Image: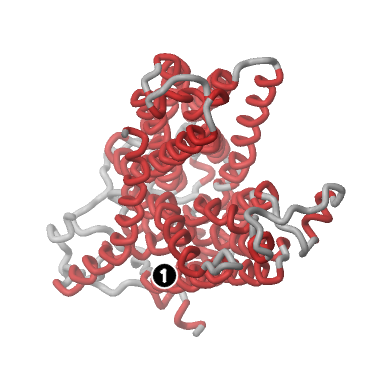
């Protein structure tokens, strides 16, 4: 994430609050995805039992 | 409401954090990705009336009813093969709607397209719920299959152009993140549907009606959140500190081809072939993965011996569970490949990435029968897991390949038209696999070996894909838009 280097003066860097929103947004989509992956792994483990 | 969805309304202000866009895209792709998981509904849907009458299984239709009679009947249960038509409708309408509405999406912007996709996809669930209530399969086909299929197409392409514009420095990674969601949707949706059906089931109902309503509502909310999270960059925006490399490959243009012009170039049709052949081979494997591992390894899957046909009912049930585990493992590698290969393509280039898919894929498909004969389940599984990463990678890398060849201005619409390759492959792949297998078995080939010829033919498809990729050259100068045409396109003036 190189958004903090060589930034033009007319385009301010993303604020700290925006990074908090990024984290929250990724958690919202990431939790269901990780839940689905965990269930898939549990099922797939049967293959190697 | 209209203003809220306008393209002008979602132009990001200075300082906007571009990393907010991929999760918005993921919210949409994770929702529509449930299309891959619809098979979780087949069994409960095929027992609706049987369960209502206290039977253990389905309430079968009279033998002399015929296909049309079965479709129109409300007094006997649907067959799983009849329900399976939903997949065909998904693929056909996904590709068709993406091709037809891709240009519209570029004009109106991703938010409006995302909202329409949410109405179509969730609306499809609600219409299907009505179909379940009335026991009318035509409503399921029309709801989830046709209207939902249009939602799939629109939802699938809605973030592509936007992400490529936000991440010109990492096009592959950005689209890979979103398209990974489409692969991951079923990983969430299938177990969720299972939980919900168990929760809503009663002594006389399967709970599938309520599950359709609940999932339609959840997906509607998730997709609206995604659509309202979309922001597009200003036309002159580029990542701070990033400038296109002056010495970059001739395979990466900084100019733009109009969507109508793109389809007149050989490059478009070569890439259409690349996608269609890669997907045909991959879909073929997905369709046969579970029965294949059961028939190839038989009793060895549960530490015993003997072919599948020689096993007891209980042993077959154990092996079927392991077959499902194998399919689950493949779906995981499918999503890993979407992100991994697309991100790698940013480093090594799109053409090289597809060369790897086709070369490595050909080798692996050809080696799979030998791996089966060797008796190594781990080796066999590893081969197919790798193949599935490249199947997913093919989907995720193609938008960036298109952007490299045709520029970013119409990449969403061009990608939409290219997705007809997916529709074609969705029909071609399974048909090829099923017919070759049936032919082999009719010729007296044992079940466990009947997959070998199929795998060699799928390897042949990848050789053809390799040749298509080999022939891709930079787009000729005459196809690119002039500056005035580009300016007109950006201000919404319809060209040609």
Q: Which SS class for mark 1?
A: helix
Pinpoint residue B428: horizontal percent, then vertical percent: 63, 36
Residue, far right: B64
Pinpoint residue A49: horizontal percent, then vertical percent: 31, 34
> Quarter of the image containing the C terminus of chain B?
bottom right
Looking at the picture, the colour scheme in use is secondary structure
Q: Nearer the viewer, residue B180 or B49?
A: B49
Q: Nearer the viewer, residue B162 or A10?
A: B162
Pinpoint residue A9: horizontal percent, then vertical percent: 15, 68
Instruction: Please report the residue visible at 14 percent of the width from the left and 72 percent of the height from the top.
Output: A16
Pointer 1: what residue?
B222
Count of labels in the image: 1
Residue, far bottom: B1
Instruction: Please report the residue visible at 50 percent of the width from the left and 63 percent of the height from the top.
Output: B106
- Is A14 displayed left or right of B164 in the figure? left
Disc 1 crowd rating (10 Å Cα; few below 14, some 14-19, many 20+) is many
Instruction: Judge whether B362 appears above or below B236 on screen.
Output: above
Instruction: Please report the residue visible at 24 percent of the width from the left and 58 percent of the height from the top.
Output: B239
Instruction: Judge whether B304 appears above or below B408 on screen.
Output: above
Q: Is residue B492 at least partly visible in the picture?
A: no
Instruction: Please report the residue visible at 39 percent of the width from the left and 61 percent of the height from the top.
Output: B25
Q: Chain of mark 1?
A: B
Q: Is residue B194 at least partly visible in the picture?
A: yes
Q: Nearer the viewer, residue B111 or B74?
A: B74
Pinpoint residue B332: horizontal percent, then vertical percent: 37, 44
- Is B320 displayed left or right of B344 in the figure? right
């Amino acid at each position: 994430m190189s958004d903090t280097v060589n930034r033009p003066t007319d385009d301010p860097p993303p604020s700290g609050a925006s990074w908090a929103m990024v984290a929250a947004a990724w958690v919202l989509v990431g939790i269901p995805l990780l839940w689905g992956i965990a269930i898939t792994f549990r099922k797939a483990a049967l293959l190697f039992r | 409401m209209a203003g809220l969805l306008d393209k002008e309304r979602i132009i990001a202000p200075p300082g906007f954090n571009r990393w907010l866009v991929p999760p918005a895209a993921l919210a949409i792709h994770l929702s529509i990705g449930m299309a891959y998981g619809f098979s979780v509904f087949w069994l409960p849907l095929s027992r609706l009336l049987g369960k209502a009458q206290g039977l253990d299984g389905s309430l079968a239709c009279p033998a002399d009813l015929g296909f049309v009679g079965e479709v129109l009947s409300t007094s006997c249960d649907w067959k799983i093969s009849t329900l399976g038509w939903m997949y065909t409708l998904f693929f056909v309408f996904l590709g068709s709607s993406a091709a037809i509405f891709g240009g519209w999406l570029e004009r109106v912007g991703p938010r409006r397209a995302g909202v329409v996709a949410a109405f179509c996809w969730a609306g499809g669930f609600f219409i299907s719920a009505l179909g379940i209530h009335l026991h009318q399969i035509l409503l399921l086909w029309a709801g989830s299959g046709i209207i939902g299929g249009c939602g799939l197409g629109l939802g699938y392409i809605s973030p592509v152009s936007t992400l490529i514009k936000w991440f010109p420095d990492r096009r592959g990674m950005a689209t890979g993140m979103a398209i990974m969601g489409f692969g991951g949707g079923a990983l969430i949706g299938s177990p969720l549907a299972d939980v919900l059906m168990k929760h809503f089931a009663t002594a006389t109902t399967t709970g599938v009606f309520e599950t359709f309503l609940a999932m339609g509502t959840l997906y509607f909310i998730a997709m609206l959140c995604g659509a309202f999270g979309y922001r597009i960059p200003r036309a002159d925006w580029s990542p701070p500190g990033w400038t296109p490399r002056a010495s970059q490959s001739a395979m990466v243009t900084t100019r733009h081809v109009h969507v109508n012009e793109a389809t007149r170039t050989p490059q478009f049709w070569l890439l259409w072939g690349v996608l269609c052949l890669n997907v045909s081979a991959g879909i073929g494997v997905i369709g046969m993965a579970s029965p294949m591992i059961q028939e190839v390894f038989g009793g060895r899957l549960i530490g015993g011996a003997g072919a599948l046909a020689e096993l007891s009912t209980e042993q077959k049930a154990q092996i079927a569970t392991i077959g499902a585990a194998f399919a689950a493992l493949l779906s995981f590698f499918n999503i890993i490949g979407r992100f991994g290969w697309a991100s790698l393509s940013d480093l090594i280039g799109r053409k090289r990435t597809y060369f790897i898919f086709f070369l490595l894929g050909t080798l692996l498909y050809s080696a799979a029968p030998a791996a089966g004969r060797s008796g190594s389940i781990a080796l066999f599984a590893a081969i197919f897991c790798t193949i599935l990463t490249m199947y997913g990678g093919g989907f995720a890398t193609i938008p960036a390949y298109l952007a490299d060849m045709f520029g970013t201005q119409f990449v969403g619409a061009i990608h939409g038209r290219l997705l007809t390759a997916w529709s074609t492959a969705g029909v071609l792949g399974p048909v090829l696999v099923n017919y070759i297998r049936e032919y082999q078995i009719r010729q007296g080939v044992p079940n466990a070996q009947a997959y070998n010829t199929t795998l060699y033919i799928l390897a042949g498809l990848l050789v053809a894909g390799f040749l298509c990729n080999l022939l891709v050259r930079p787009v000729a100068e005459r196809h690119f838009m002039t500056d005035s045409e580009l300016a007109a396109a950006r201000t919404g003036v319809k060209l040609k």
